[in-house]
Amino acid sequence: MLIGWSAYRDGGEAGGGSGIEDALAARDGADFVWIRMSGPEDGEVRRLVEAFGLPELAVEDAVLAHQRPKLERYGDTTFMVLKPAVYDDASETIALGEVHVFQGPDFAITVRHGDVGPLDEVERRLQLDPELCALGPAAVLYAVADLVVDAYVPVISGLERDIQEIERAVFDAEAQPPTERIYALMREVLDFQRATSSLLMPLDDLSRGRVAGVHRDLTAYFRDVADHARLVHERSDNFRELLNGALQANLALIGLQENQDQRKISAWAAIALVPTIIGGIWGMNTGVPLEGELEGFLLLLAIIASTSGYLYWRLHRNEWL
């Protein structure tokens, strides 16, 4: 549905509303118009295609969603896909949405998918920064990209906290092995890494002025966003290595614990075998000395106790018990 629109002229906002026909009418007297949509309906999209000549392939991507970050150029229209992210610390999951941006000579259209936050901050920024707004509709593309990348920082912080907790749990003898938690967080990190890695090349193109229709003065702005995105990607890559290391250490400690348990079981089995063997031989009625006598019974107990005690001492000394 249509969330709203704003028209800009001479670096300031010249009007706004929520009707698509009003937005198209305001286009004539403005430098550019920005139309904001969320989960667009087919009829609304068709109207925008007719009014702005949007490329069919890009429109299909924007309606169906489930795209990786990318940047494409269709004639005088730039189409970019970004993946905003929100980290839920309670469930240790990353919610990924999508923002599709169409930018032409006198328009910018943003299409959101997923509940990952509105673009109100972009609108406020354009209102408070006339110099940025004066650089044309590509300023909307920059402001959206900057907002999305800035929102990656809390995600990185949340992941870092949980990885530190996992590292402590791995070496805590009283804690349950966090194997399942490690695997789950690794999956979230991989999904997040795919979103950030695919964004690096489009931002690099924008920061180097390789995209037509983007004001040259915006390259410095995009360079800052690209640097932040690269830093986020590097940190997420480090998280993957840390989780791999934690997983290997966790599995090694589990194997060590299982080996220690097996050694203890074997040690106690060896001690228990002593009275079994001695008692079995003594009770075979083969004429052993002192058979049937109290002295013989006490001797038997002494042999069993001393042998078992010696075995326990040696096994304990060798850290089997």
Image: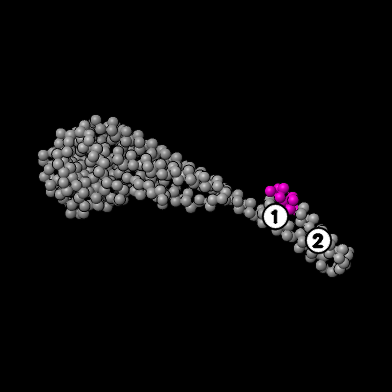
Residue 61 placed where, x, y %? 26, 49
Residue drawn at point x = 41 percent, y = 38 percent: 234
- Three-letter code for the amino acid on which mark 1 is drawn: Ala
Secondary structure beneath label 2: helix
Decide: is 150 above or below 306: above
| Residue neighbourhood size for the residue with mark 2, other residues' Cα within 10 Å, grouped as few (<14), some (14–19), many (≥20) | some
> Does residue 65 appear left or right of residue 163 in this picture?
left
- Three-letter code for the amino acid on which mark 2 is drawn: Leu
Judging depth in this view, the residue of 300 and 205 nearest the camera is: 300
Specify which label sits upstream in the sequence, 2 or 1: 1
Residue drawn at point x = 38 percent, y = 45 percent: 192
Residue 57 visible at all:
no
Residue drawn at point x = 44 percent, y = 48 percent: 185
> Does residue 218 appear left or right of residue 163 in this picture?
left
Whether residue 183 is in magenta: the answer is no
Residue where numbered disc 2 is placed: 301
Q: Which residues are magenta?
A: 311-319
> Does residue 269 appear left or right of residue 214 in this picture?
right
Residue drawn at point x = 28 percent, y = 44 percent: 81
Decide: is 284 above or below 270: below
Residue where numbered disc 1 is placed: 267
Judging depth in this view, the residue of 16 and 265 nearest the camera is: 16
Query: Residue 152: which quarter of the image?
Result: top left
Secondary structure beneath label 1: helix
Residue 209 placed where, x, y %? 27, 32
Query: Residue 230: which quarter of the image?
Result: top left
Residue 318 placed where, x, y %? 71, 48
